[in-house]
Amino acid sequence: MIEPLALHDTKWTPAKASIVMSIALDQQVCVNLTLNSSEMELQTRHCHILVLDNFFGEEERTELLDLITLPSWNHANGPPARKWERISDGPGLPLTWGLNKDSLLEVERASANLPTFKEIISRLAKLYPDYIICKQPHNCHFVPPKYVINEGDVCGQFVANAAMPHEDFRWHVDADPSEFPEDCAWVKQHGQYVNTNPGKPLFVTCLLYLNAEWPMDWAAETLFLDDATDCGVFVRPKPYRCVLMEMHTVHRLSPPSPLAPYPRYSFVWKLLFVPRRDNHICTIALARVPPSVPNPGSDFTSELETLPEPRARESETSLYSVVFGAASLPDLQTI
Ligand SMILES: [Fe+2]
C-alpha cells in the first residue's frame, strides 16, 4: 500500500533553502490510539508548519505551471477550460477551480517521468533523512469498502488550485488518520492513530506556489488556524516558496484581491513520511529555533538538527519551532 517515491542524484543541498517560518500551533490532547484500551494514555500533539524559500527554482516553477495550464497560456483568461473545471469538495460546499480528471491523470503520469518531480522528492529526502518519502496511497484506502472507487479513478495525491477573486474557500484539514473509518483498508493495516504518533506514517502536505510574481496587495494568503484560541498565522504566495504542513493542520486559502489580474496558482503534493526507526517522533519540525526567538531566513545548515531519540516526550518537538496559540500553553498532559 505504501510506495516510496523515486529519487535521483541531486546537486541541491539544504543550504540553498531558507526556513522563513517553523511553527507549532494547535495543541490538542488525544488518546494514544496505538495502545490497547487497558493501557489508555493521553498525549499532546501539535500541528507543525514549515515554510521554505528557494526550495525550488524557475525551471521547476515553469514546468509545473505549464503542466497544470498550458505553455504560453495567457493567465488573464483564467485557468484553461481544457484542463480545469469548477468543482466542490463536498455537498453544499462552494465551487472553486480544480484540475479535471484528465488533467489529474496527466499530472500522475508526468510525476513518473518529469525530472522536476524526482528533484522535489530528492530535496525533501535530503531535508528529512530520517524518513522514507512515500506516495499517499489511492483514495480508495481511506473510505469504507462499500464506497466503490472505479479502476482508473485518480489517486488523489495531487491537487491544484487556481484561486480567483470573490471565491469562497472553507477551513479544512487535508487528512487525519484518527478520523479514517475503522473498516477502511488503511486502518485495517495501520490502525487508527493520531498523525505524528511515534513510528507511524506521517501525512504531510507539500504546497508549492507557482506564480512568477504575487505582489502583497493581491492577497490570496494561505491561512492556518489555531483552533483552540481562534488565532492564526498566514503565508503569502511567493515564487519558489514551499509550505510543508502536517495534514491535520486546519487551514484554508483566502481569495485573491480583485486587483489580481490572473489566478493564484498552487500545486499540492500529498505525501507520507515513513519513519525509518520504530517509535521515531514524527514531525516536519526541523530547525532548532528557541520558542521566543524567531529566526527568519536562517542558514539551514547551521540550524538543521535531527530530533531527539525515541521516547522523548512528544511536547519536546515544540522546541524545534516557534510555538503559537494553544501550542504555547502549558503541556495539557500534566493538567
Ligand atoms: Fe488543503
Image: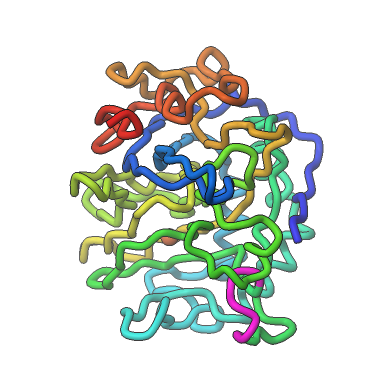
Can residue 208 be seen at all in this image of the molecule?
no
Q: Residue 23's x, y, as percent?
A: 37, 33
Seen at 73% across and 35% down, the residue is 276
Residue 302 visible, this orientation: yes
Residue, x 53% and y 21% (percent of image)? 300
The quarter of the picture where the N terminus appears is bottom right
Q: Which residues are magenta?
A: 141-147
Q: Specify whether residue 145 is painted magenta.
A: yes
For the rendered model, the colour scheme is rainbow
Horizontal side of 1 relative to 40 (left or right) equals right
**Residue depicted at 69% across the width and 30% down the height:** 129
Q: Quadrant of residue 82?
A: bottom right
Q: Quadrant of residue 319?
A: top left
139 is higher (above) or lower (below) than 248: below
Give the main secondary structure of the magenta stretch. Answer: loop
Question: Residue 295: where, in percent of width, then height?
Answer: 36, 19
Viewer-side residue, 220 vs 135? 135
